[in-house]
Structures are given as C-alpha cells and as structure tokens.
Image (cartoon, rainbow, N blue to C red):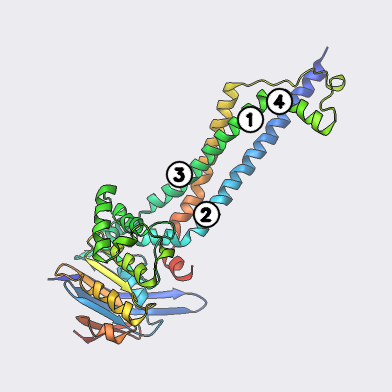
Amino acid sequence: MNNFIQLSNISKSFDNSKKIRVLKKISYKFKKGMIYSLMGPSGSGKSTLLNLISLIDRPTSGSIYIENKLINFNNSNDNDILRANKIGIIYQQDNLLPDFTSLENIYLASLAAGNTKEISLNKAHILLKKVGLTNRSEHYPSQLSGGEKQRVSIARALINDPQIILADEPTGSLDLETAKGIFDILKKQINSNRIIVFATHNRFFANKSDCMLEMVNGNIKTINA
Amino acid sequence: MNSSLFSALKVERNVMFIILSLIIIVAAFNIISGLTILVKNKTRDIAILKSIGVLNKSIIKIFFLIGIIIGTSATIFGIILGVTFSMYVENLRQFLSSVFNISLFPEEIYFLSTMPSEINPSSIFIISLCSIIVTTIVSIFPALKAAKLDPIKALKYE
C-alpha cells in the first residue's frame, strides 16, 4: 500500500562507440517512511538509477510509477513540475548556482515550485536555521566550505517538503566528521510520508539505512531490509 | 537638368540601405553568438535549474529576455548616439578639421557650406522597431538551445 516508487523492468543503455547496458530490467518497489542506501562500485549504475527516479533521465525500456501513476517521459513539463514539488536532489559535488547566495539558492527551488517570493524566503530562512547556516545566508557558494555547501544543498532539496529525497553520494567529497554531520541532517528528514534514497561507497553510512541495496550486474540486490 | 545627380543620389541611398541592413545582420549574428556563448558558459547552471524542476519554458524565458534586454538597450543607446551625432555633425566636422588640420568635406568640392543633417522621427521609429524585432527573433535560437540542454551530460562533464 505504501509503495511509493515502483520500478518495472527498467533498463538503461548508453550508445557510445560500444553499447553499454548499465541497468538490466530492474524491478523494485520503494516504500514510504524508509531510508534506502544504494551501494556498488563506480560505474555500477547508482547515479543512473537515481537520475531515472528523479525523472531527469529516461529509461531505455521499462516503466516508473510514482504514487501509482505511470510516468510519461515524453511529457517533460509534467515531470519537471513533479520533480519541483515532490523530489529533492542532493549531489556529491556542490551543485549550487555560483552567482546566487545561499539563501537565493535555497528559495529558488521554492519559486520553481510556483510559490511566491515571500513564502519562499520565509521557508528558506527556516531551513537555513535548521541546517545551522543562518549566519551564512548572504554568502556565495565560493565563500562556503564543502560541508556548508552540502548543508545548503540539503536545505534546497527540502524546501518544497518533497516526498522523495535522492542523494547521490552526498558525503563523498567530505571528511568523515563533516560527512557524519551531513548524514545526521539527512537522516533526520525521514518521516512516514517520505522516502530517502542515497548512493554511497561508505558502508558505515549504508549500515545506518533501513534497507541496504547493492547494484550488482545492472540489477538491484537487497542486502538487508 | 540635374537628373544624373538625382539618379546618383538615389543609387547612393540604396547602397546605404544595403550597407546598413548588412550592419544589422552582423549585429544580429553578434547577439546570436553572444547568447550562444552565454548558454555554453551557463551550461552547469541551466542543468542545476533543471534538476530543481525549473520548467523548460522558464529557461527559454530567461535567455529570451536577456536577448531582448541586450537588443532594446543597444537600440536605445544607438538612437541617443545617432541623434546626438546628427545634431552636432557640423561641430564635429569643424572639431576634426581643426584637430587634424585637414579640410573635411571642403565646400569647393562638395558645394556644402555646412554638413547637412535631418532628424526624421518616423525613420528613427521604423529603424528602432526593425532592430528590436530582429534581436527578438534571433534571441529565440540560443534560448531554445538552452532549454534542450541535457542536464545529465552537463552535471557530469562540466
């Protein structure tokens, strides 16, 4: 009943000089209220899978259902709206807009979801406080440390209260202590109405998830649930 | 009596029109290339905007507006410069003649005691309108290019 994301026979190939099949007929159901960790070596398809779930990329074959609704990858407009409202994405590298301050980077995502500037600003201020960066609101990404940038990214991902949070190696470029702090913030965001999926190479963090998944030969293998 | 002179003036007017049209075309290509470079430089930013759910039409709007702002401000700047030049063309001729110690447009050759100049508001309006329309049209192409950008490639390789 609480299957929120359903992958049905998802395959993804890349046509370069040689055709590479990254994902091979993956079928999986992600349930609400759970934190999933996605492990696997580099090139195993973790990022590709997250890009498909975030509707940024389209599968070569197969279907994705979100809230039991089949995603139509030809309708990019609807998918953009869905992504703005229901999906928050955190990348490994700081994917913040360099010409905008922390506050602007955060509230821009709310504007994209159709909120007014006033509402967006209020939400951004609350989130900056939540991630402990109130004093950094007017700083540009170049003036922030790696950990601070990630906290801004988390705040941006949370501003529209998304039901899905996808994090692609969010602690990958941070030292262990900072990474623990970032992971704690991320873990606190789980609630009964939300799914968090994070890709990681770090087994320490993966062990803290509710369900450990591993990418093996282009497929998902459940290690523990 | 002066039919050959008028004919020559007419030819000159047509040639000037062609030259000015070519200048507008070159300017339009400048706007296209400028905006294309801007889109290229902002590839990563566009990908980030897409990843947070900004609609393609909003991205088109951003770059389209930049093109219109450039075109309109350049047109306004051009009008101010052109009108000022027309108003003070005689003063400018005298100034340049005195600075470089040469006789610019001598009266004995050109039969003109002063540099003729006429400010025609309707011509200014038509030229401004054409210039804004051309820049608006050419802004569409880079804007569409920005919207078509693949965010995966941009985030991965930029």
The residue under label 4 is B89
Q: Earlier in the sequence, mark 4 or mark 3?
A: 3
Classify B31 as above or below A184: above
Residue drawn at (31%, 61%), measured in percent from left and top? A135
Please provide percent x and percent y for residue B27: 61, 42
Give me the chain letter of mark 2: B
Distance in Å between CA atoms under marks 4 and 1: 10 Å
Q: Residues within 10 Å of mark 4 (few under 14, many from 20)?
A: some
The residue under label 2 is B38
Please provide percent x and percent y for residue B88: 68, 24
Q: Earlier in the sequence, mark 4 or mark 2?
A: 2
* In the foreground, A61 or A184: A184
Residue drawn at (53%, 51%), measured in percent from left and top? B35
Classify B120 as above or below A97: above
SS of the residue under disc 1: helix
**Closer to the camera: disc 3 or disc 1?**
1
**Closer to the camera: disc 4 or disc 2?**
4
Please provide percent x and percent y for residue A24: 34, 80
Q: Are marks 3 and 2 in contact (CB under 8 Å)?
A: no
Please, what is the three-letter code of the amino acid marked with disc 2?
Leu
Residue drawn at (22%, 82%), measured in percent from left and top? A208
Please, what is the three-letter code of the amino acid marked with disc 4?
Val
> Are the residues under marks 3 and 1 on the same chain?
yes
Distance in Å between CA atoms under marks 3 and 1: 25 Å
The residue under label 3 is B65
Distance in Å between CA atoms under marks 3 and 2: 13 Å
